[in-house]
Amino acid sequence: MNDNLHTHITTIVAEVLNIELPSLDNQLRSQIPSWDSLKHIELILRLEEQFQVRFSSREVAEIQSTDDLVQIIEVKS
Amino acid sequence: MSHTIVVERFGIRLRPITMDDADFIHRLRRSPELSRYIGEIDARLEVHRLWLEQYLQSKDDYYFCIELLSGKPIGTISIYHIKGGKGNWGRWIISPSVPAAPASVWLIMHIAFNILGLSEVYSNTVINNASVVSFHDNCGFVRTGIEQNGLTIRGISYDMVIHSVTRDIWPIIQGKLEKPAALAERLLQEGMD
């Protein structure tokens, strides 16, 4: 996995959710209460804009962690 | 109550609940994934159908099915306990696989303020239901109180967080929800059906 990309995405996740992430390790959506369904969509919007990619509906539904985001963006960009 | 309000935007529609929705609502409310923090419902479908029949005879209670434009139901939402220009919005259950939460809230607020002419709506969320409490906070709904032991589920009492939205802050929330709702519409068009 691309470390720079991972750091970049994790930083964006922290900004959108307005939280400090404890580390750059994989963060699970289920363990971050503020990663709610509204913030999830806001995060997708921000990442699409930042990386000039488009997520599919299936991907949006299946993303459960920061690693999931990195993997999808790595493939698309 | 039996009503005729239908609204449609962002790839979804809110339309009145009917007796034909009884099975769907019963399944939805008994789903382990979705029912963790909502009031318990009798396991017997016929009891639920009776409740729905009574609902249709009630007053000041607007219960909606949230559905895709294809007609596929994906959840429920309602406004009830309307008194003095205020209403309780709730019974909000939506399939997590469909990104239509912001859109459904946009539409129910539109009904509350622009169709029913309410001045305020409020909701009660189990405090342990962290992601839904967060959703309300992030929408810009204002925390106005805590209802101690407001709901008992499977023998455990939970405090409820009360969030309110007044007509004057609705335009701000409306603006906040529109972009996420529009993205959801694109995703729905691309193939959630």
Image (cartoon, coloured by chain):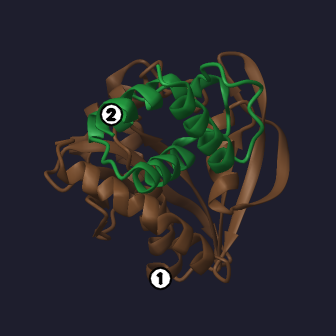
Chain colours: A green, B brown
Residue B49 appears in view: no
Numbered disc in front, either 2 or 1: 2
Q: Residue at x 52, y 47 (%)?
A: A43
Judged left or right of residue A42, residue A74 is left
Q: Please tell me which residue is depicted at 24% across the width and 50% down the height of the picture.
A: B188
Q: Secondary structure at mark 1?
A: helix
Q: Which percent across, then down, holds residue B133?
A: 68, 43
Q: Which residue is mark 2?
A: A59
Label drawn at residue B69: none
Q: Position of residue B171 (x, y in %)?
A: 58, 80
* For residue B95, above or below residue B173: above
Q: Quadrant of residue B73?
A: top left
Tell me the kind of residue under disc 2. Answer: Glu
Chain letter behind tag 2: A
Using the image as rendered, state which of residue B190 and residue A25 is in the foreground. A25
Q: Amino acid at mark 1?
A: Asn
Q: Position of residue A71 (x, y in %)?
A: 40, 25
Depth check: A69 or B172 in front? Answer: A69
At x 43% / y 23%, what residue is drawn? B30
Q: Is residue B29 left or right of residue B149?
A: left
Judging depth in this view, the residue of A37 and A42 nearest the camera is: A42
Q: Chain of mark 1?
A: B
Q: Looking at the picture, does residue B184 appear above or below residue B153? A: below
Q: What residue would you read off at disc 1?
A: B114
Q: Position of residue B84 (x, y in %)?
A: 68, 77
Using residue A66 as the reference point, say whether residue B184 is left or right of it.
Answer: left
